[in-house]
Amino acid sequence: MRTTIRLDEQLLTETKKYAVATGQSMTAVIEDALRQMLTKSKQLAERPPVYLTTVDGNGLQPGVDLDDSAALLELMEADDTL
């Protein structure tokens, strides 16, 4: 089927260069790109939602500083030895 589309000049130039470099027609490059985008979009729409488990609490325990990864690692390792 023949149709007309309008492309940004820079995108058109890059598409032509890619087509030449890969030995494809510009039509094949555009078709492949559209197929990939539509497939990805469909896969994302079909992906089941992610539910995160959360718990009630009173915030961080005393001495926990989330900005200090070394201290946080020490606290976590100390809990492993109990």
Image (cartoon, grey):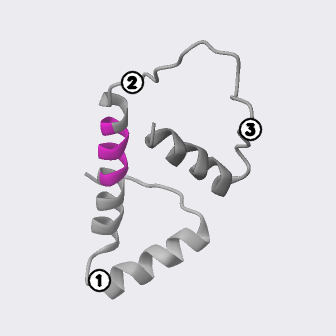
Which mark is in front, 2 or 3? Answer: 3
Determine the main secondary structure of the stretch shown in magenta: helix
Residue 29 location (% of width, % of height): 33, 68
Q: Name the residue located 33 percent from the left edge and 25 percent from the top edge.
A: 48
Q: Is residue 49 above or below residue 11?
A: above
Q: Mark 2 points at which residue?
A: 49
Q: Name the residue under label 3.
A: 63
Q: What stretch is highlighted in magenta?
A: 36-43
Mark pair 2, 3: CA separation = 35 Å
Residue neighbourhood size for the residue with mark 3, other residues' Cα within 10 Å, grouped as few (<14), some (14–19), many (≥20): few
Which structural element holds mark 2? Answer: loop
Query: Which of 72/22 is in front?
Result: 72
Q: Mark 1 points at which residue?
A: 22
- Indicate the quadrant where residue 23 lies: bottom left
Residue neighbourhood size for the residue with mark 1, other residues' Cα within 10 Å, grouped as few (<14), some (14–19), many (≥20): few
Which structural element holds mark 3? Answer: loop
Mark pair 1, 3: CA separation = 58 Å
Magenta stretch: includes residue 37: yes
Q: Name the residue located 30 percent from the left edge and 58 percent from the top edge.
A: 31
Farthest residue, direction bottom: 21
Residue 13 location (% of width, % of height): 52, 78
The earlier-in-sequence mark between 1 and 3 is: 1
Query: Which of 56/24 is in front?
Result: 56
The earlier-in-sequence mark between 2 and 1 is: 1
Mark pair 2, 1: CA separation = 38 Å
The earlier-in-sequence mark between 2 and 3 is: 2
Q: Name the residue located 70 percent from the left edge and 28 percent from the top edge.
A: 60
**Label drawn at residue 34:** none
Magenta stretch: includes residue 38: yes
Q: Which amino acid does label 1 sit on?
A: Thr
Q: Which amino acid does label 2 sit on?
A: Pro
